[in-house]
Amino acid sequence: MKRKDINRRTFLRISAATGAGLCVNPAPKASVLAAELKTNDHAMPVRALGKTGIQIPILSMGVDRPDSQNVLKVAYQSGIYHFDSAHIYQNGRNEEQLGKFFEGKPRGSFCVSTKGMFPFPLRDNFEEDILSKLDISLKRMKLDYVDIYYTHDIRMPEKIKDDRILNVLKKIKAEGKARFVGFSSHDQNPEIIHAAVDTGVYDVGLISYNFKMKNLKENEEAIERAVKSGMGIIAMKTMAGGTEDAEGKIQINGKACLKWVWQNKNITTVIPGLTNYDHLEQCLDAAKNPEITPDETNYLAALKEKEMLYCQQCGQCKSQCPEKLPIPDIMRAYMYAYGYKHARQSKETIAGLNLDKHICSGCEVCRVSCPSGFDVGKKVAAITSVTGIPDEFLT
Ligand code: SF4
Ligand code: SF4
């Protein structure tokens, strides 16, 4: 089957010819442009993002470190042009980093998304809060609009359907501050995807998706329904924790993980946090040769039932814990530190949970029995101390 590939030169040529980039073209033009794309040895396949008209390579960049200016530059030169950020990442330094990077570049030559937190239940002034934070994000990035604006970290179907949230998202779109709106969710809960589809408001879903997930069938059915409805789906947590062991010592074969994700044609692109040249090179190499090999398939199959660092976010621990701790989030923070070696993100995640200083003090032995085999009490104790470490000592 002929692949629809694009490289930066082709992309910019087409952008120049049409007066705009792929990211800013309406759907009809984008479909014409897709037909023009030529196969190229140095190119990545592109896929359509639902009915948005945006076409992006299967590899995008999660911008989750403040020191990635040079990596951003090389990624862009290599044909990556969708960059994912969030208002809260690195207390804004992340978006500032992107603003510096975007300076002088044609607006149509890149595609950018950011996210805002909508604490739930909603506060009376939530709309004002969200809109002012989005203005700050735009100012940091020196932009008039983002391509995708997500309501961040959705955990409940009821939240995604809340009329006040839907109205503020519509307002953001109507005012031209975001071309498209979406939701992000770590929870692997297919009900969240179904609820988003039911609203008819969300253009894009940013969801966890990897070979380790236990409820894949239900999630894939929900993804299929979302794509059929016109929603674009972007995958995160594709590296399933970053290491193939529970101790965080053996780096996982990231190429195999990405190729596994790309087998699902309903996934438009992935946003691994590309933090160094080696990682970028590996991911680019995988994107240019995305067909998974039998060896890679076997490798992942052997890891499927093994204890790793990836928390299934199944929530079974919550009811077992007398303190009702947000254990899935704490496990995610543990994964950031020990799997992705990203201790600052771990610290931010823990700080955002507003945990009591004396958590777990009422338990002599942890009462949680985790189906993934995690020693939850030990991990909670290990990772919550990260908040006491000054940022300058963290990666
Ligand atoms: S820690 Fe275990 S029980 Fe809790 S959400 Fe993760 S996998 Fe499920
Ligand atoms: S030790 Fe385990 S059960 Fe007890 S509060 Fe901590 S996480 Fe919950």
Image (tube, rainbow, N blue to C red):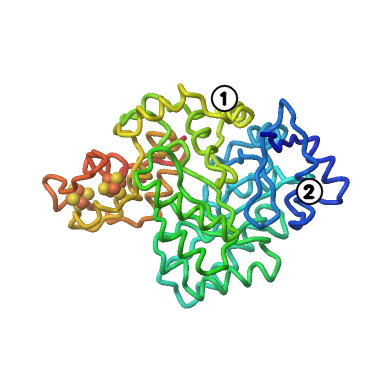
96 relative to 194, above or below: above
> Is 116 situated left or right of 21 in this image?
left
> Is 113 situated left or right of 198 in this image?
right
> Is 76 situated left or right of 331 in this image?
right
Q: Secondary structure at mark 2?
A: loop
Within the image, what quadrant is residue 277 found in? top right
Q: Amino acid at mark 1?
A: Asp
Q: Amino acid at mark 2?
A: Gly
At 40% from the left edge and 37% from the top edge, which residue is drawn?
241
Return the residue at label 2: 21
Give how far apart the Cα atoms at labels 1 and 2 are. 29 Å
Q: Return the residue nearer the eye: 243 or 359.
A: 243
Percent of width and height locating residue 122: 44, 72
Return the residue at label 1: 278
At 52% from the left edge and 34% from the top edge, which residue is drawn?
258
At 50% from the left edge and 72% from the top edge, which residue is drawn?
126
Percent of width and height locating residue 131: 59, 68
